[in-house]
Amino acid sequence: MKRLSLFLEMFMIISLVFTVSCVTKELPVIETYYETEYKTETYTETENVVVKTLEGKEYLNPVDKWQTNLYFLPGVASPGQLAFPSVYELTYYYGYEIITAEHSRSQVEIRVSQTALQQEGEIRVIDLTGVGQIPRKPEPPMRKFITETWGKKWLDDLNVVVTNPELILGAIRTGIDAENQITFDATGVTDFAIFANTWNLYAIKSVELIWSDDTIEQRTVVKERQVPVQVEKQRTIMTTKRVPIWGAVFGK
């Protein structure tokens, strides 16, 4: 027992001496870490490639045409409604049917005559796809006093179409400095009509369908993309350690 007690005392003394003889010191340590970087890699992909484009145009003739004493009223709802004016003014209707499904791209180009541009009014193009051509104003019943009231339902139905912003393919105000052309994307359009405030029978100079047909082939193409990669790196950091006092003194 005395030997054991003596041994424990000696151990505690040595430990105390060792602890007292240690100091705290900052030491450099190499640390490994990872960063995300991006590198360019190539890959192949099969896709549709346009190898040739055929372009053409064709003049369109109206499938229906009529004239009546209607006029786009300025200053009312935008876009303005067609109405029976107080003076005798005219609007021409030109209805067209086209086939665009067979073309890759298509557009319609409408040119207006200079004479029609000099008259103040409006020329408006309406998409009638799914609606069909607008019939001409019905004739008044026989042996009845002729007023414009008999055509009110026809006019109301017409205004539902011509004032719908989603159906307007293009419009120009005629008069001073008016543009002489309306162009619209004809993709998906099968029927449309031109409403022209004018006295001129030949207000519309020309209507052309301009189309493009693409020849497409599947080809393997080489592309590039950026991909993330984890890159191992190292850096020196300072860490705190306890070292013997004589190590600190002698730089160890």
Image: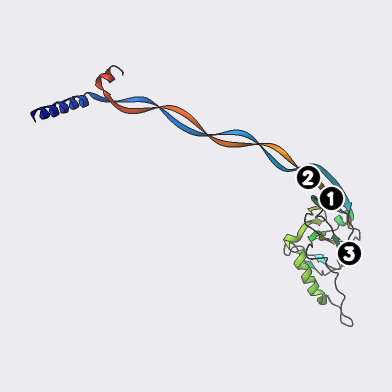
Which disc number belongs to residue 210?
1
Where residue 106 appears, as percent x and y from the top left, is 81, 51
Residue 178 seen anywhere in this rendered image of the structure:
no
Foreground mark, 2 or 3, reads 2
At numbered mark 2, what does the secondary structure look like: helix, strand or loop?
Answer: strand
Residue 176 is left or right of residue 225, and the answer is right
Q: Nearer the viewer, residue 228 or 9?
A: 9
Mark closer to the observer (1, 3): 1
Q: Secondary structure at mark 1?
A: strand
Q: Quadrant of the N terminus?
A: top left
236 lies above or below 166: above
* Percent coordinates x, y for residue 36 in the rendering: 52, 35
SS at mark 3 in the image? strand
**Colour convention:** rainbow
Distance in Å between CA atoms under marks 2 and 3? 39 Å
**Residue 41 percent coordinates (x, y):** 62, 34
Q: Earlier in the sequence, mark 1 or mark 3?
A: 3
Q: Position of residue 243 (x, y in %)?
A: 28, 24
Tell me how far mark 2 sits from mark 1, CA to CA: 20 Å
Q: Amino acid at mark 2?
A: Ile
Occupied quadrant, residue 82: bottom right
* Residue at 58%, 33% in the rendered image: 39
Q: Residue at x 84, y 50 (%)?
A: 210
Query: Type of residue at label 3?
Result: Lys
Give the labeled residue for mark 2. Answer: 216
Quarter holding residue 126: bottom right
Q: Are the residues at dot 1 and dot 3 in contact (C-beta closer than 8 Å)?
A: no
Q: Which residue is mark 3?
A: 65
User: Which disc is residue 172 wearing?
Assistant: none
